Image (tube, rainbow, N blue to C red):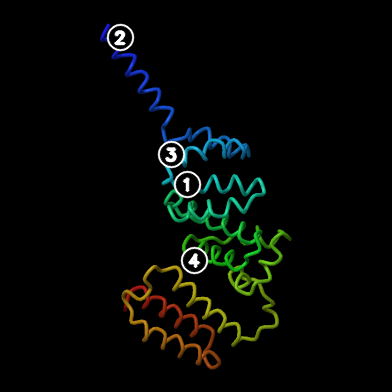
Amino acid sequence: MPGKILVAVAAAFLTATASASPIPDRERVRLLVDAGEWGDVIEILTPALERNPYRGEDWHILGVAHARLGDCETAAPLLNRGIELGVNSRTWGMQDAHVEAAQCAALLGDPGLAVDHLSIAQARYKFSDFERFNADPTYAELIEQPEYRRLAGLGDWANVDRVEGWTADLDYFVDLMERRHPDPFHTADEREWRNAVAELREQIPVLTDLAIRVRRRLADHRCRTGV
């Protein structure tokens, strides 16, 4: 009899543990995401995150589910939480996280925040598919932002003269390198590097295109290596 009682207690414990598991059925969630069954995704992940609130990927997927149902008010903080915790620790995961957050920010009327997310997605995670925004009239306000147009490579370049074009290109290069590298001046002196950039900017009118490309490449190399 004591043995049977012990077995029953163990079985009850295992059942309770399984039911309280903080890990949702990943395969089921994946299939539901693929099928666009966002309500079911929310039903699974909401209680799972109450039990284990430290999985960035789950926060991200939950945020995407709410966004797909047209509720960016709810989705935005969920997406941001996913970014804070990290999504898969892979390039595409964090890239997608920032792009989704940018989409919600734009739809909520905050194009500046949307640009911030896209800037990070581009600089750190190699995002380049701006056409998804350019081709969608929903993002018209975002597309009109000068910073977005710079990121997406939009502009009336036919009316930009050579000096203006190279100056804009140099400014973009400097901004992109400083945002992409977590510590861009760990090997190069920041003051010297900025002075070199300023000197190059002043010399653009008299330098050839090839000379500008070479000097910019050298500036990039020095910032990366200190040589």
Disc 4 crowd rating (10 Å Cα; few below 14, some 14-19, many 20+) is some
Residue 77 position within the rendered picture, expressed as x and y whole percent measured from the top left: 54, 54
3 vs 4, front mark: 3
Residue wearing tag 1: 57
Q: What residue type is labelled 4?
A: Ala
1 vs 2, front mark: 2
Which label sits on residue 4?
A: 2
Residue drawn at (42%, 31%) of the image: 20
Residue wearing tag 3: 51
The image quarter in which residue 146 lies: bottom right
Q: How far apart are the alpha carbons under marks 2 and 4?
A: 62 Å
SS for callout 1: helix
3 vs 1, front mark: 3
Residue drawn at (61%, 60%) of the image: 105
Residue wearing tag 4: 123
Which label sits on residue 97?
A: none
Residue 177 position within the rendered picture, expressed as x and y whole percent measured from the top left: 45, 73
Q: In this view, does 29 lie above or below 94?
A: above
Residue closest to the far top: 1
Q: Nearer the viewer, residue 175 or 153?
A: 175
Q: What residue type is labelled 2?
A: Lys
Lower position in the chain sequence, tag 2 or tag 4: 2
Q: How far apart are the alpha carbons under marks 3 and 4?
A: 34 Å
SS for callout 3: helix
Disc 1 crowd rating (10 Å Cα; few below 14, some 14-19, many 20+) is many
Q: How far apart are the alpha carbons under marks 1 and 4?
A: 21 Å
Lower position in the chain sequence, tag 1 or tag 4: 1
Residue drawn at (60%, 73%) of the image: 147
